[in-house]
Amino acid sequence: MKKEQNNDAPSTFDEKWLEMSLLDLWAAGQETTTTTLYWAFSYLLLHPEVKSRVVEELLSITKGQRSLSITDRPNTPYYNAILTEVHRCAKIIPMNLWRNTSEDTMVGPYLIPKGTAIAAQVSAIMNDETYFEDNYEFNPDRYFSGDRVEQMVVPFGLGKRACPGESLAQAELYLIIANFLLRYDVTADPEHMPKMRAQKEFITMRMAPSYHICFKRRQ
């Protein structure tokens, strides 16, 4: 960038673009995963029966002798269902990124003129009662019905413009939450329980409300 500026060469990249790129890397690469972790522990603390059941599954795999590995994923169906349900219920990015139509487009009976800014509301897809019975309930068991409703959980978007960091984020969540549960007995502080209403929004993210969490090292 400085070289182009020194040579008076035309460029579309300037300090403003640099600032926005750095913000994108920070928000998309770190803050989204952190926010999902906040929500995940919220749901586990509010549903101790789910937490107990998943700890049992994790211990059956590791025997309490090792950390969970990403290669264990095929053997942890209930834990996988919990992560899917966390994404569905948390909906940390309710709206996908904006796009502009490159030409006049018909969507059903509606004309979308060229140059219109459009975005998919992924939260509506993941909360559609057509596919999710009791759609406001946190229920990992819904994914064992055989209806393949997990295909409707699309927190990372779809297609060629889906989040490029999906695989990394999913692996991080899988390993971090499970290995916390294996190492610690995680409980809530009754005086500072999690709440399901989003505390605030940061850029496009739904932030989890603050709460206290207690970690007791397992023997």
Image (tube, rainbow, N blue to C red):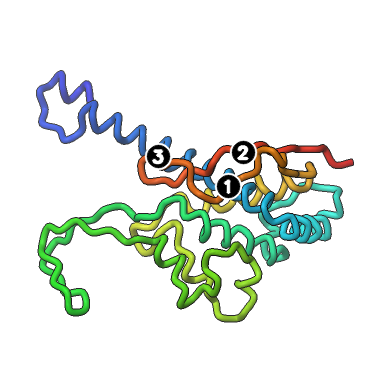
Q: Earlier in the sequence, mark 2 or mark 3?
A: 3
User: Mark 1 or 3, which is nearer the eye?
Assistant: 1
Residue 15 at x, y = what percent?
Answer: 24, 26
Q: Secondary structure at mark 1?
A: loop
Question: Which image quadrant: the N terminus?
Answer: top left
Residue 165 at x, y = what percent?
Answer: 46, 49
| Numbered mark located on residue 195 in the image | 1
Point 21% across, 78% down: residue: 108
Lateral position of residue 63 relative to residue 91, left or right? right
- The outermost residue toward the top is 6
Point 48% across, 53% down: residue: 166
**Residue 216 or 191: which is nearer the viewer?**
191
User: Mark 2 or 3, which is nearer the eye?
Assistant: 2
Q: Secondary structure at mark 2?
A: loop
Q: Amino acid at mark 2?
A: Tyr
Q: Earlier in the sequence, mark 1 or mark 2?
A: 1
Point 12% across, 57% down: residue: 115
**Residue 144 or 47: which is nearer the viewer?**
47
Q: Secondary structure at mark 3?
A: strand
- The outermost residue toward the front is 191
**Residue 35 or 45: which is nearer the viewer?**
45
Please count the marks in the image: 3
| Numbered mark located on residue 85 in the image | none
| Numbered mark located on residue 211 in the image | 2
Corner quadrant of residue 219: top right
Say which residue label 3 marks: 202
Location of residue 151 with respect to 51 vertically, above or below: below
The reply to whether the C-beta atoms of the residues labelled 1 and 2 are less than 8 Å apart is: yes
